[in-house]
Image (tube, rainbow, N blue to C red):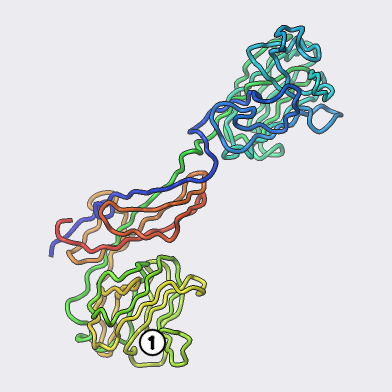
Amino acid sequence: MRKLKFLGAGGIGVIVLLIAVFGIVSANGTSTIDFEGLSEGQIVSSVSSGSGISGAVVGGSVSVLGIRPGFGPNQAMIFDATCLPGGTPVDCTGGDTDLFNPGLGNVLIVSEDNDSSDPDDADLIGEMFEFDFSGFGPGVVTVDSIDAMDIEAGQGEGGAKIEVFSGGPGGVLLASVGIPDTGNGGLINVAVGVSNVDFMRVTLNGSGAIDNIQITTEDESNPAIDIEKFTQVQPAAVDGDDCDIVGKPVTLTMMYTGDQFPTSHTQDAGKVDITPNTNASPVHIIATNKSDPNDSKAKTWFEGAVPLNGTFDISAALANKDRLSSNTYVLVFTEDGSTLLQSIKFHTSCSQPLNLGDQFGSALLVGFVGENGTVQPPTPAPPADADSAPGPQANVGDTILWSYVVTNTGHVDLTGVTVTDDQGVAVTCPLTALAVGESMTCTATGTAVEGQ
């Protein structure tokens, strides 16, 4: 018999189609907290993309707090360093000529008196800013650098520093970077270069301002998804009617495949009845001799939870009988047993053929114990990753079971997730939406043919 090799799930290229729903963000974005778009004198409690933050557009906001020892809860205020309308140092509000810098625009100060009509900076030991990044994008950033202005160590403003943390203000101190003396009205860019920061404290210890806090966030715009393919070969059934070989069935071993429609069986169409609507995992299955398992004459051949590609035994012995009845019903419910997903009826009195490999909806016959003996099911090969040669091997007529493990590895929830196969096999998935980190297993079934 011709051997067939299957690479990449039978030479199958897998296409994953998805739609992401969440914030719109730019790829591996660098953003700058430049306080532009805010009003002079405004008390700043948060900034966000387009409102105090330029560059890469990232969802969420950064919380801001300005602390002036002994005064109100938030003293973070916008100062216009262009000092318009005149645009000269003498036009600066609050007499802060040392903060004049037309190239900066808005800067952030700790307000001296919380008077929004006349912004001016405080000059106290212990004054500082705090920035909370936990609500911005993925919740952590890389702090690249900060502009500091008018830091005068000679005027008692030594010890100015930038501290970055992981785990909030009480978390792990990742780094402490000193801010050098800029001299009166001077400007310096302080490199930080620390990743995984969710909280930052900037201590001024006196007058001064900060601006252009450059931060980088991980790419959150392009959803990430991982798919792993596995191939399992189910050898074809033995030739001949199993009823002729071992007599009427006592126990049938079935595999739950999740398929909605019968792929193949040897019984007359009028003897088989299938209501399609499955593709869940795990499921609760009841096998009985009646369409209603609560019928007073119903005999339960099997009841229990079955995972995708799991097997279960339909056994006459469970109802204290020597063999199965004329008709067998396989009822597939949701895991909690509340909703019927699929009803399968097939003939089990041997007036119709019954062979290993027959598939009735989501139930594949893989084992047969009769009154006179047992038909040994061919041993299926274990599922294999078919990404590289030589790949799983199969004979013509073997059933091929493919499984696709799909995982949302990005930072955004996904909807509209489907898996298609360019070889035309129908792939069924239990979900169309995946939360961050969530996985699902999709399946497809085919038959090995000459030439694959």
Q: What element carries label 1?
A: loop
Q: Quadrant of residue 264?
A: bottom left
Quarter of the picture holding the C terminus: bottom left
Quarter of the picture holding the N terminus: bottom left
Q: Which of 116 and 223 is in front in this view?
A: 116
Mark 1, residue position? 289
Q: Quadrant of residue 269?
A: bottom left
> Residue at left 80%, top 11%?
95
Q: How many neighbours does mark 1 have within 10 angstroms: few (below 14), some (14-19), or many (20 or more)? A: many
Q: Nearer the viewer, residue 152 or 31?
A: 31
Percent from the top left, x then y, of residue 346?
Answer: 31, 81
Percent from the top left, x then y, of residue 154?
Answer: 77, 11
Give the mark count: 1
> Residue at left 37%, top 60%?
428
Q: Nearer the viewer, residue 106 or 139?
A: 106
In this rendering, would 102 be left or right of 374? right
Query: From this viewpoint, which residue is outermost toward the left?
Result: 1
In this rendering, would 216 be left or right of 166? left
Q: In which quarter of the image is residue 350?
A: bottom left
In this rendering, would 327 be left or right of 110? left
Query: From this viewpoint, which residue is outermost toward the right?
Result: 70
- Residue 23 to residue 93: above or below: below
Percent from the top left, x then y, of residue 325?
Answer: 34, 90
In this rendering, would 211 be left or right of 256? right
> Residue at left 76%, top 9%?
91
Q: Which amino acid does label 1 sit on?
A: Asn
